[in-house]
Image (spheres, rainbow, N blue to C red):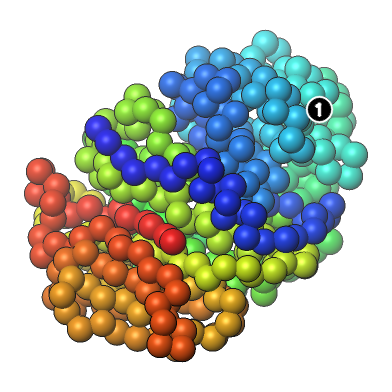
Amino acid sequence: MTRLSSSLASAAAAAALYSSGVSAQKLVFAHVVVGDTASHNQSTWENDIKLASAAAIDAFALNGGYPDSNIPIQVANAFAACEALDNGFKLFFSFDYLGGGQPWPATGDNSVASYLANYTKSSCYQNYNNLPFVSTFEGTKNIDDWAPGGSIRSAAGDVYFVPDWTSLGTSGITAHLDNIEGFFSWNMWPDGANNLTDDGDKAWQSAIGSKSYMMGVSPWFFHSGSSSGTNWVWRGDDLWADRWQEVFDVDPQFVEIVTWNDWGEASYIGPFVSDNEVPTTSAPYVDNMPHESFRDFLPYYIATFKGSNFTISKDQMQYWYRLAPAAGGSACGVDGNDPDQGQTEVDPNTIVQDKVFFSALLTSAATVQVQIGSNSPTQFDGSQGLNHFSQPFNGQTGEVTFSIIRNGETVGNGTGAAITSSTSLSNGCTNYNAWAGSF
């Protein structure tokens, strides 16, 4: 199976386009599903860390479920890689209370407390306010484990605890504010055929008061990893561009990018390593569908979020889109929305829009052009700085060409994967995943 992957050199070059300061207060993390790193070794982790660091990401949130025999091996590899690089990048734990089939034990061998005791002394462990930073994915039935003076803090020491307990709702979290230092909301994808707003983030901020807020940002979502349960799609479309504008509006303390490597949910921005790390049912939807170009504007987005100085020194574009109309294949059991989470099921083809989505980061005003196949190009007026647009398929097929034109001269251009009239998958199913590219 072949997949397109940007090189480390190109990622470093992209980051070098910007000069930015470093804020000690605001931090940006990337969510790594450790269970999807079975083929990693120390060298692979080093490559991931270099790529993330080149994109201005501060740390990896190591998300692991219990029990999973892969977790101890790969956590050790990750810390060994980080310590060997010694480049300022950090790691911290995000204990997944749902992903492994059982909740994490608070103490004992292979427990929350044992992982914290073993790794928080590492030079690579992420601290905040002089305390080890720790998060979760859910775990609302184990809240008392995290209480001040409770079993985890008594065994492993105090922590800066920022859990995702989104299932409690904004009214439910207020009863547990004494147990947390901050809060992470998992509400980062829209419900139904809608675009996401930041109203939910502001509601969480209001509910937690003076506690710090961690905001989730994700480029896409298509769950294809289940062979017997529910698979579903939420709207991505303009989400990557829109969500960063919402970050600037909400101004949280932390941002967590979800995810670095979740192939089964199509939210990845990291590099492909091995077929063994991809759920079997997801493989057809991931094959030749790179997402690494989503990282290209991160140095700009992160510097802006942190209020740091930056200089745009080169025109750039990034673009993403599905490779066929949603109706060009069969849904093959994919739902629009997730009824298992209490959402109303809708036609998945109403969730996604048959459009090309693209952003341009410009040194000065220019014309941004998109052309699908041999059809007439469409032009957009771009201003200095960040611009975002979309262009409907309108039945057009062929390779997609993107150009930046200034004073009648093409100053940058790139060609994206071809759009076809029907699905290219051998199983006849619609691929709700996106292809991403850039120049």
Q: Can residue 70 be seen in this view?
A: yes
Up-down relation of residue 409 to residue 336 (above or below)? below
> Quadrant location of residue 205?
bottom right
The residue shown at (56%, 61%) is: 297
- The residue lying furthest to the right in this view is 130
Expressed as whole percent of the image width and height from the top left, the position of residue 415 reads: 30, 63
If the image is split into quadrants, where does the N terminus sit? top left
Up-down relation of residue 147 to residue 14 (above or below)? above
- 112 vs 197, left or right, is right
Instruction: Tell me if mark 1 has few (under 14), some (14-19) or many (20+) residues whose alpha carbon lies within 10 angstroms of its own.
Output: some
Expressed as whole percent of the image width and height from the top left, the position of residue 284 reads: 22, 40
Expressed as whole percent of the image width and height from the top left, the position of residue 63 reads: 57, 34
The residue shown at (57%, 55%) is: 14
Disc 1 element: loop
- 67 vs 162, left or right, is left
The residue shown at (70%, 13%) is: 108
Q: Which of 296 and 415 is in front in this view?
A: 415
The residue shown at (46%, 84%) is: 406
Up-down relation of residue 72 to residue 278 (above or below)? above
Up-down relation of residue 95 to residue 353 (above or below)? above
Amino acid type, callout 1? Ser
Q: Mark 1 points at which residue?
A: 123
If the image is split into quadrants, where does the C terminus sit? bottom left
